[in-house]
Image (cartoon, rainbow, N blue to C red):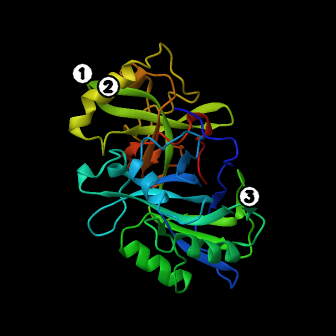
Amino acid sequence: MPRVPTNVPEPMLARLTDRLPVGPTWSYEVKWDGYRCLALKAGDAVTLRSRNANNLTASYPAVAAALRTLSAHRVLLDGEIVALDGEGRPSFQALQHRTSRTGHVLVYYVFDLLQLEDVDLTQEPLSRRRQALKKVVAGSQVLLSEPLPGSPVDIERELRALGLEGAIAKRTDSRYEPGERSDAWLKVRFQLAQEFVIGGFTQDGDRVDALVFGYYDKKRLMAAGKVRAGLRPAARRAFAATLLRLKRATCPFLNLPNSKHGRWGEGITPEDMATIVWVKPSLVAQVAFTEWTEGGSLRHARFIALRTDKGAADVGRER
């Protein structure tokens, strides 16, 4: 993919925590299940930049068109490209199709303003950036991800009831820190899920039966299990063809085999190793699960979708 202009910074990132912080300086937003995207508008020219610096503009023309409805001449926004169903619920799987043919609509939820005209706002507190942002998006087709009312307990209860992925807590006095994973932004997942690197797969004829995946610990690729659930029957054959183009002779995981008699998904035995087709660890998958086992594998893993917006080398275990 073409790269984006150099004046678009890396996005500020949130740290994972197990509960929403409490206090008067904290505010809370929905954690949208989509593609993180910085958007630069200069006149009628729009550039969409993914988290790993790819240019997404041609892939999401509807989002680019929405950004052109902003009245500001030059603006730099931070937000999320999201696929919404008829009831307004986000679907990451639907986002993979990049069109509304699945019955979903693609939108851009914006939650931060980094630049307005020639003014850099990254050193302004979040509260002031939000005030300016609300005026910038007013009357446009860009959607505003607004702070949620209520206590953290109330917010978590309501978001869980809606089946949403999680919440983001942000300090209202925080500055924008490009490329930093800051304690001023904290994320809570209500359903355990994260990105993993695909390093192998098992076959069922000419189709994928299951994926073997893991994460990087420093520069070591560590296996975290196997996933079969969530792989759609219609996509298994095409997925196998893609993975076979990445085939390699040796196992890329440092810690395999990691079980003598574990079940698939909770350990991989020497006998299991002989059934696995190893691949170059370059594809990233989003995987949901119930918990980590003491042995470092996932329990009840479920494939959600491929993540083309994340680089394999950046995938580590979230704690």
Q: Is residue 244 above or below residue 62?
A: above
Query: How far apart in space, not on screen, are marks 1 and 3 (Cα)?
Result: 47 Å
Answer whether labels 1 and 2 touch (C-beta < 8 Å): yes
Is the C-beta separation of discs 2 and 3 under 8 Å? no
Outermost top residue: 249
The residue shown at (56%, 66%) is: 111
For disc 3, the marked residue is: 177
Mark closer to the observer (1, 3): 3
Which residue sits at x=54%, y=44%? 296
| Residue type pointed to by label 3 | Glu
Whether residue 19 appears in this view of the structure is no
**N-terminal of the two: label 1 or label 2?**
1
Crowd band around label 2 with a 10 angstrom C-alpha radius: few (<14), some (14–19), many (20+): some
154 or 110: which is nearer to us?
110
The residues tagged by marks 1 and 2 sit, at their Cα atoms, a distance apart of 7 Å
Inspect the image, locate mark 1, and give the three-letter code of the amino acid beneath it: Asp
Q: Is residue 296 left or right of residue 238?
A: right
